Image (cartoon, coloured by chain):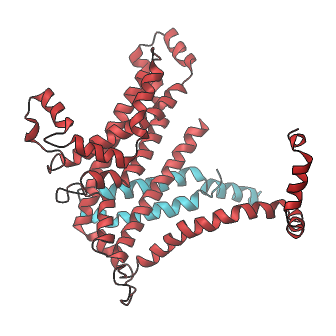
Amino acid sequence: MTGSHIPDALANRLATATPPKLAARVRGLSDKAIAWLFITPTMILLLAINIFPLIWTIRLSFTNFRANRTNAVVKGIGLDNYTSILTDPDIWAAMQSTAHFVFWTITLQTLIGFTLAYLLDRKFRGHGFWTTIILIPMMLSPAVVGNFWRFLYQPQIGLFNYIISFFTGVDPSSFEMIGSVTLAPWSIIIVDTWMWTPYVMLICLAGLRSIPDYIYEAAEVDRASTWRQFWSITIPMALPFIMLAVLFRGIENFKMFDMVNLLTSGGPGSTTEVASITLKREAFEKWRTGFSSAFAIILFVTVFGLANIYVKALNQVKSR
Amino acid sequence: MTDMSQKSLMARIFCRGPWETAATAFIGAGVIMLMQPFALALYTWSFLTTLTGVVMFVIVSKFPE
């Protein structure tokens, strides 16, 4: 039908544009060969930018290679890098900072995200507008968010300190979110929660909307209270979606780098030094490339393991 | 008959579900061991636990349902 709209002159020109030899060769290819022809460039690209660096990193993790001393002799040191990392109390502390960050962001995001989704699922007037407004932080770039929260956290001119001061009566310049050892981890948790709660809310909303109305109607016929309906219908049926959001945010926050780097760069001292910041310091400040490669592999295996659980949870949600 | 019973025994042993759950438990335990603040020894063995879980998961995901 569409072909009939192509003028004959144009069709002839297109047909003659392909060199006869190439046309003959392409015409002779099987479907499988044509499929390979299309897939090959992507596979080559994938091998070049993903698989090769991964294999190279694994290789480097068993050496004492330093990227700033390319002329030095590279020695194979076996599992020494792995042993050093897994017995280093400083890296263990970085892992604990990561755990603190992951635990609190997931807890807050799940609680606030589910509450917002539950409220938006009530379908009140203008709920579409409020959904869009709530989703805005998620659409911003982490670089932009990191920069403007730095301004908001300024003790002299920042809005955050003035809002806290308005509600608590504390002098706005008496505390510093980013500069304080106790408050700096929370400053990152607040920003991440502000930015990614809408994402959790969106997944929870999808879960709540997937619950059929007739289940609630049957519960009402059985005179089940709203509280009972919430605990016996809403929570169990939305749980796979909540788990999905928790796993996805867990994986993302485990590798969090940009926001922490922009807000505190791991400081003050090393209080907000999460695993990815330690990795950057080892690789590009101390130039211990072999050591940092081993650390990257440890983080990769952990994220890969979590991703496996994520896929398993996703399949369970799909099979529902 | 023996072949059939052997096949069903193999199918029962190499069933994906419980093995996948075991691999998931290994990964979960490894991640918790990596980030816990209580014992350095647990942290030291965390990577090996996670790696065991990951390798196990990759293998058992090929098992029949």
Q: Position of residue A139 (x, y in %)?
A: 43, 40
Tell me if I can see residue A245 in this picture.
yes
Q: Residue at x 54, y 14 (%)?
A: A218
- Front residue of A63 and A164: A164
Q: Residue at x 45, y 46 (%)?
A: A248
**Number of callouts in the render?**
0
> Which quadrant of the figure contains the C terminus of chain A?
top right
Query: Furthest residue to the front?
Result: A9
Q: Position of residue B16 (x, y in %)?
A: 59, 53
Q: Residue at x 22, y 66 (%)?
A: A89
A215 relative to A185, above or below: above
Q: Quadrant of residue B60?
A: bottom right
Q: Colour of chain A?
A: red
Q: Position of residue A250 (x, y in %)?
A: 39, 48
Q: Position of residue A165 (x, y in %)?
A: 12, 31
- Front residue of A122 and B41: A122
Q: Quadrant of residue A280?
A: bottom left
- Front residue of A295 and A231: A295
Tell me if I can see residue A237 in this picture.
no
Figure chain in cyan: B
Horizontally, is A223 left or right of A46 in the view?
A: left
> Which quadrant of the figure contains the N terminus of chain A?
top right
Horizontally, is B43 left or right of A177 in the view?
A: right
Horizontally, is A163 left or right of B57 in the view?
A: left
A158 relative to B57, above or below: above
Q: Residue at x 45, y 20 (%)?
A: A127
- Front residue of A34 and A209: A34
